Image (cartoon, rainbow, N blue to C red):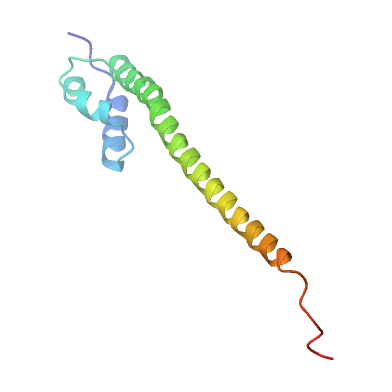
Amino acid sequence: MGHHAPAEADELLHVRLRAGGVDRPSIVAAPRYFRGELGLGGLMQTSQAFQQVQDALSFFVQSVQGDRGLVRRGRAARRLRAALERVRRQSSGAAACGPPRGNPRS
């Protein structure tokens, strides 16, 4: 079994737990730490390893979110292009009818 960390480290961990400033792996591993089965270094390594895995997996989440935004922008661009095409057709149709006959003000 590992040696127990100094009282200052225990107090720091207690303060962090009470303040909510501890990540999930630290909370999960805390009982082993307080029983003296896990040293402070092991507790920190557990937390760091979890953070590295979380960072690696967040890449996929961010990629999917980016793809969704790309799809939305693509749809918006297609709608804009369709609206511009309708306006072009309408203005072409109005021009084909010719200029208005006579001056309504005369």
Q: Position of residue 69 (x, y in %)?
A: 47, 41
Q: Is residue 97 left or right of residue 71?
A: right
Q: Picture quarter containing residue 95?
A: bottom right
Q: Is residue 71 above or below residue 61?
A: below
Task: Name the side, left or right, on which 7 lies relative to 96.
Answer: left
Residue at horizontal 31 percent and vertical 42 percent from the top? 19
Which image quadrant: the N terminus?
top left
The C terminus - image quarter: bottom right
Q: Nearer the viewer, residue 67 or 82?
A: 82
Determine the image quadrant of residue 90: bottom right
- Taking the spot 40% from the left edge, 25% from the top edge, the residue there is 55
Give the image location of residue 5, x and y in percent: 27, 18
For the view shown, which residue lies furthest in the top direction?
1
Is residue 49 shown above or below 26?
above
Question: Looking at this rendering, what residue extends furthest in the right direction?
Answer: 106
Q: Residue 6's x, y, as percent?
A: 29, 20
- Residue 82 picture location, percent across and down: 56, 52
Residue 58 position by quadrant:
top left
Q: Residue at x 23, y 11 (%)?
A: 3
